[in-house]
Amino acid sequence: MGVTPTAYQQAVLSVPEAVNLALAGGRGGGKSYGALLVVLRHVEKHGARARPLLIRETHKALLEMEDTLAELLHAAYDGVRHNRGEHVFRLPNGAVVELGQLSEPSQYRKFQGRSFTLLVVEEFGALRDARRVELLRSNLRAPEGVPLRCIFTMNPGGVLHQLCQQRYMHEQAWHPYTLEGETWVTCPSTYLDNPHLDHADYERKLRAACSGDEALLKAWLSGDWAIARGAFFGDLVSPDAHMLPDDWITRKPKGWRSFVAMDFGMAAPSVAYFCVQPSEHVGRVAARSLVLLDELAVAEPADLNRGLQWPPGKLAEAITHRCVTLGIAKSGVCDDYRGLDDTLIGEFRRFGLFFQRPAKSRLSGWARMRELLQAARDQSGQPGLFVARRCRYWWQTVPYLPRDELRPEDVDTTAPDHGADACRYAVLHSQSRPVTTATHFVY
């Protein structure tokens, strides 16, 4: 049929059919076409029993993938029937290939209750919500003898950057590993693996698309998932500058200000930080700096954007225990929540935790947070922002948060921004004067 896979695509095709694939790396490496070649082999081998489903997030991207797949299938078969309105290909051997969009939760209904034998998710890292893919994976069912399989293509950056890095990029490339009971292989590539590209010209195009963002350019060229791309805080956050060891202090010294800052969620994670502000310089930490000493992050380990739906009483018990252990005041700031018998702040008050609503100014909060990160990085002697190593959710999410594409001065709120929001509340609260009147807000 005249299709010659590249060396990278041939390596992808050589992975056993029962193994899931994470096609990850820089841009232009031939990952998408490699996934389509796997689809072609699947329908050829399994014929009428094959029901692949290919997913893209946006309609424009879906049509682009559909056109490429049409060329490939028409080159391989005579008599392919293509329904563009339904995005369905029916092949002469009885196989059916379908494409779909998954930008909104309601779009899953189209696939609910149906069975597919192969799931390909193109640009998995750009999806807004990984849970929609998990729903689709529940549709993988096949006759005996047809192995079920998932193939995810992904580039560094995007909403699910950290999730992709955490799940698929910590293992040795091209070696099988187990993830949630299934076998996966991560298959990295870069534009240099694609002999069909003019490499110099492609690099120039990527550089132009990055608009001077060197971190993002490096990620796209090298496929390096360890960097924070052109993230909102990516140019500022550094473990060397901002991370404190877990034994920096084990309990708040007398005279230091302390409080709790929390972003509450049910379906989304609840994240609380136990904060101190030293009254004097402590090593590289300037007086009045904000230190996130510890963290309570109620999130799914495999999905940093999904909460565990802890009720207020369970959260209050965990927060109180941590406050007592660390010597932190049982007061601070928490975004309120209605829909309970009382407001969230009212519920917490019943458990001996005394919170007030945080300042909600997003843009000024981010600006002040960046100022504190800059001061800590520059060792200017001015108050900075420091985060203990044990605040794992912060380190897993905040350095990688993407910008809002339409409002670049804000973070993308569809990304796992819950730790960043709690940190922003802490930053703004740390600038306020401690309450000394006859209230419950004692520092």
Image (cartoon, rainbow, N blue to C red):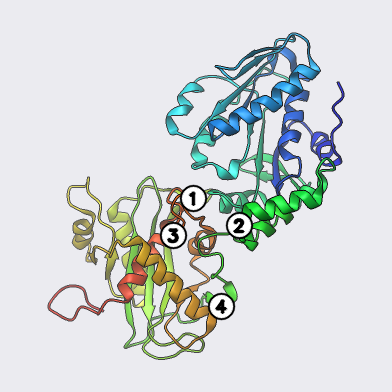
Let me know if residue 171 appears in the view: no
Q: Distance between the residues labelled 1 and 3?
A: 9 Å
Name which of mark 2 and mark 4 comes first in the sequence. 2
Name which of mark 2 and mark 1 comes first in the sequence. 2
Q: Residue at x 76, y 17 (%)?
A: 74
Write down the residue under mark 4. Answer: 241
The amino acid on which the numbered mark 1 sits, given as a three-letter code, is: Glu
* Helix, strand or loop status at disc 3: loop
State if disc 1 and disc 4 touch (CB < 8 Å): no
- Whether residue 308 sits left or right of residue 329 in the image: it is right
- Whether residue 210 sits left or right of residue 37 in the image: it is left
Q: Which residue is drawn at 25% across and 79% down?
A: 433
Q: How far apart are marks 2 and 3 (CA)?
A: 16 Å
> Which of the two marks, 4 or 3, is nearer to us in this view?
3
- Whether residue 113 sits left or right of residue 258 in the image: it is right
Q: Distance between the residues labelled 2 and 1?
A: 13 Å
> Which of the two marks, 2 or 3, is nearer to us in this view?
2
